[in-house]
């Protein structure tokens, strides 16, 4: 809530908004501040007064109105109106946030002391042909005869400011304490009394007739006590008419008299309530994207702060090595040593400065983004349709504009934490004064790009790249393959390219491949070993397998093994791309993890995909089904889904399905799906619309759903947050199944594949008790 405070302050006075009005440019300003920045224009400009605020000025009107604004080239504020012949230049003041404030040009009555804001009832009339300039976008317009009354009041913003100030107010006191009142802890809505804990137990026991009373926190009780019935919005043009329609062309609420007599008669209008709900939905949807950017920014800031620590550590280590080398040289090296240390320190400080500047910039942008999000969420809570619609378009544009500012490159480090310099201590003493830093590091091990590596018939294509943020120069690469029968490696390519296709391999053979980089300093380490299998015959060209045989570093869970031994692959079905398998050798067995994504081609049209088809949601309130792009018929497979968004307690379903499953009902409603559907408290197993095994324990945002499909036992098991949910869900499974999910617009999930099976699960014979150990 604290970060929203900037959204609630007037750009002129720097204080919280008081009686805010909405300018035609969608910016807000206090009513009193609006009077203070009025400027009287010459009579010659009076024909422009027809472009008053209350007549629905469009964005195109500003093309003419902006000609009246004169900007100063010497500062960031907007200039005075000294350019008018009949308007003398008026000294200007600056508000707390730097915006220039122009006092009224009308003569003030003599008084011992003039106040910036006259007392109510004594406000002087607004001069004819007055002009007001927005302090934020500097757009100007001339007021009509109604003056500032022609601008609509922003009741939504006023309500948000009131709630914010109430939340910051001092604690309420108990109303029943006899001597010094204690701080109240609850309020009874029926009794309308604030109680401390002792008085509540003594005067308001939770039994008898008082048991049905509702106790709420004091802050909530104060708000509910002060809340008054919603005021009926009236038209600024016709003060006796209520706002009941919304003009789509002018983007403003209107009354029936505006449609019959005003310029809105020929415009497209819609019901006020319908447009209120529509714009609330648009703002909520826009906030989802902005929320994702804010989350990424927080993670990025953590990464930058860790980088600062790494730079500090690497800098200290580098200095120590440099000092050790220089101290080993003769006295002539000591004179050069100070210069080299200065070079290192300069590089050190430069890296720190770049990263710290990026942290500062990203922190400011994140604070602004979070403040805008909190403000928008408070605006959405408002129940005043017309007040909301007055600001909804501007807020939606701001949210989209803020989201676009988190574009590509914003969340990318501008500096590496490595010091890629090595002192060359080989030159002779006569060349000591020419000592300098040279690059003496060999390249890092290349990274194989699995998504681009494949086999087709008897040829293999391999692709690789340098590790991210690596700045070490690479002169070329060396690609090595074995003979397809476990023999020694041999060089098949040397060059600068990062992709290579090797032809003429043996059919039905398993080849190991690896790649390394080299430069003038030497040859770097090998990449992980990639194993690929060629087709059995030349007629089979759609199957390929990619897997690592190098052991994983620090596996997240203990890795089980399968009974099939390497390299026969007899337990694999012939699967088309893009299904990939990752293997880990654990002699004499091999472990397999399947990678797949969700399939837009077979999903219901209401499903919305993102994140390379790994994240899905829905634009319908009804349940819709989406399946994986690959089917399983053998082996043991495990995948997980994380709940990214969970609103209004829906009940998504997770499981497996046949290819012809119904896509417009909940998963498990027909006989083509086997699923678990779950809400925030419990779960059920469902197949052919039969519900079984209700189990306590639900989901929330951030929860993880796991699905374990074991064809060796023919069973399906579900997990929630790494704990098995209920007994074995389904048994006797045979045939081909696709991973599947059903959800509606209140849920968003992200798929995670290529995972090892849970550590509690031991492959083997089925447990007769129906549980897994």
Image (cartoon, rainbow, N blue to C red):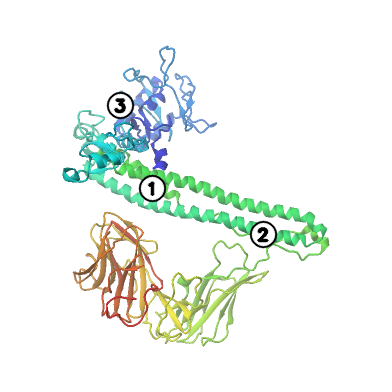
Image quarter in which the N terminus is found: top left
Alpha carbon distance from label 2 to label 3: 69 Å
Look at discs 2 and 1 and give the one toward the viewer: 2
Dot 2 lies on which element?
helix
Q: Quadrant of residue 41?
A: top left
Look at the image and tell me in which quarter the C terminus lies: bottom left
Q: Earlier in the sequence, mark 2 or mark 3?
A: 3
Please say if 12 is above or below 278.
above
**In the rendered image, which residue does mark 1 sit on?**
400
Pick whichever, 368 or 222, lies toward us: 222
Residue 93 appears left or right of 604: right
Q: Secondary structure at mark 1?
A: helix
> Which residue is identified by label 3?
149
Is residue 427 depicted above or below 353 in this figure?
Answer: below
First of labels 3, 1 by sequence position: 3
- Residue 455: % across, % down: 46, 79
Residue matched to label 2? 318
Question: Which sits earlier in the primary sequence, circle 2 or circle 1?
Answer: 2
Q: CA distance from mark 2 to mark 1?
A: 45 Å
Disc number lying in front (2 or 3):
2
Q: Position of residue 686 (x, y in %)?
A: 22, 69
> Pointer 2: residues within 10 angstroms few (<14), some, or many (20+)?
many
Dot 3: few (<14), some (14–19), or many (≥20) neighbours within 10 Å? some
Visible in this render: residue 188? Answer: no
Q: Nearer the viewer, residue 360 or 221?
A: 221
Q: Residue at x 23, y 42 (%)?
A: 268
Name the image quarter holding residue 186.
Answer: top left
């Amino acid at each position: 809530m604290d970060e929203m405070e900037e959204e609630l302050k007037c750009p002129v006075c720097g204080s919280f908004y008081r009686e805010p009005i909405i300018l035609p440019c969608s910016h807000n300003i206090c009513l009193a501040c609006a009077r203070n920045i009025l400027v009287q224009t010459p009579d010659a400009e009076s024909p422009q007064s027809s472009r008053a605020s209350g007549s629905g000025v469009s964005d195109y009107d500003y093309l003419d109105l902006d000609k009246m604004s004169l900007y100063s080239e010497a500062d960031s504020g907007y200039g005075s109106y000294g350019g008018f012949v009949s308007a003398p230049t008026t000294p200007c003041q600056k508000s707390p946030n730097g915006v220039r404030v122009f006092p009224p040009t009308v003569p003030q009555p003599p008084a011992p002391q003039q106040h910036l804001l006259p007392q109510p009832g004594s406000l002087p009339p607004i001069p004819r042909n007055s002009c007001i300039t927005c302090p934020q976008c500097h757009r100007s317009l001339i007021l009509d005869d109604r003056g500032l009354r022609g601008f609509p009041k922003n009741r939504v913003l006023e309500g948000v400011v009131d709630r914010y100030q109430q939340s910051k107010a001092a604690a309420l006191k108990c109303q029943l304490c006899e001597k010094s009142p204690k701080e109240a802890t609850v309020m009874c809505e029926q009794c309308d009394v604030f109680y401390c804990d002792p008085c509540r137990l003594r005067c308001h026991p939770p039994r008898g007739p008082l048991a049905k009373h509702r106790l709420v926190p004091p802050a909530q009780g104060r708000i509910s006590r002060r809340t008054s019935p919603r005021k009926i919005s009236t038209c600024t043009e016709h003060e006796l008419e209520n706002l009941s329609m919304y003009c789509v062309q002018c983007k403003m609420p209107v009354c029936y008299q505006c449609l019959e007599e005003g310029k809105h008669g020929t415009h497209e209008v819609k019901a006020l309530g319908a447009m209120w709900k529509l714009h609330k939905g648009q703002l909520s949807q826009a906030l989802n994207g902005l929320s994702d950017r804010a989350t990424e920014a927080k993670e990025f800031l953590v990464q930058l702060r860790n980088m600062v620590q790494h730079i500090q550590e690497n800098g200290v280590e580098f200095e120590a090595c440099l000092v050790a080398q220089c101290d080993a040289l003769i006295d002539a090296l000591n004179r050069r040593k100070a210069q080299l240390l200065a070079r290192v320190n300069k590089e050190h400080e430069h890296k720190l400065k770049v990263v710290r500047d990026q942290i500062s910039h990203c922190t400011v942008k994140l604070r602004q983004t979070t403040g805008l999000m909190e403000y928008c969420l408070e605006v959405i809570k408002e129940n005043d349709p017309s007040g909301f619609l007055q600001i909804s378009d501007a807020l939606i544009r701001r949210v989209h504009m803020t989201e676009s500012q988190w574009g590509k490159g914003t969340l990318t480090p501008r500096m590496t934490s490595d010091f890629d310099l090595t002192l060359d201590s080989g030159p002779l003493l006569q060349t000591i004064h020419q000592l300098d830093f040279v690059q003496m590091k060999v390249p890092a091990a290349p990274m194989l790009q699995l998504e681009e590596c494949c086999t087709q018939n008897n040829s293999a294509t391999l692709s690789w790249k340098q590790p991210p943020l690596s700045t070490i120069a690479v002169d070329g690469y060396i690609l090595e393959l074995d003979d397809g029968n476990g023999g020694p490696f041999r060089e098949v390519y040397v060059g600068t390219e990062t992709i290579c296709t090797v032809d003429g391999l043996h059919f039905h053979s398993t080849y190991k491949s690896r790649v390394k980089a080299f430069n003038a300093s030497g040859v770097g380490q090998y990449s992980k070993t990639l194993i690929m299998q060629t087709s059995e015959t030349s007629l089979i060209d759609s199957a390929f397998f990619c897997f690592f045989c190098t052991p994983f570093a620090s596996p997240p869970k203990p890795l089980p093994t399968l009974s099939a031994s390497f390299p026969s692959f007899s337990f694999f079905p012939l699967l088309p791309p893009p299904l990939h398998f990752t293997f880990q050798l654990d002699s004499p067995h091999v472990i397999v993890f399947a990678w797949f994504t969700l399939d837009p081609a077979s999903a219901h049209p209401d499903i919305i995909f993102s994140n390379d088809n790994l994240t899905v949601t829905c634009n319908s309130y009804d349940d819709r089904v989406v399946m994986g792009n690959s089917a399983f018929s053998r082996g043991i497979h495990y995948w997980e889904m994380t709940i990214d968004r969970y609103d209004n307690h829906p009940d998504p379903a997770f499981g497996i399905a046949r290819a012809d499953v119904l896509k417009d009902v909940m998963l498990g409603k027909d006989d083509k799906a086997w699923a678990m559907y779950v809400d925030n408290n419990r779960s059920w197993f469902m197949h052919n619309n039969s519900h079984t095994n209700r189990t306590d324990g639900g989901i929330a945002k951030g929860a993880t759903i796991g699905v374990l499909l074991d064809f060796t036992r023919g069973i399906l098991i579900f997990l929630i947050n790494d704990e098995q949910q209920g007994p074995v869900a389904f048994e006797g499974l045979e045939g081909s199944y696709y991973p599947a999910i059903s959800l509606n617009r209140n849920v968003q999930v992200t798929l995670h594949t290529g995972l090892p099976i849970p550590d509690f699960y031991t492959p083997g014979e089925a447990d007769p008790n129906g549980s897994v150990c």
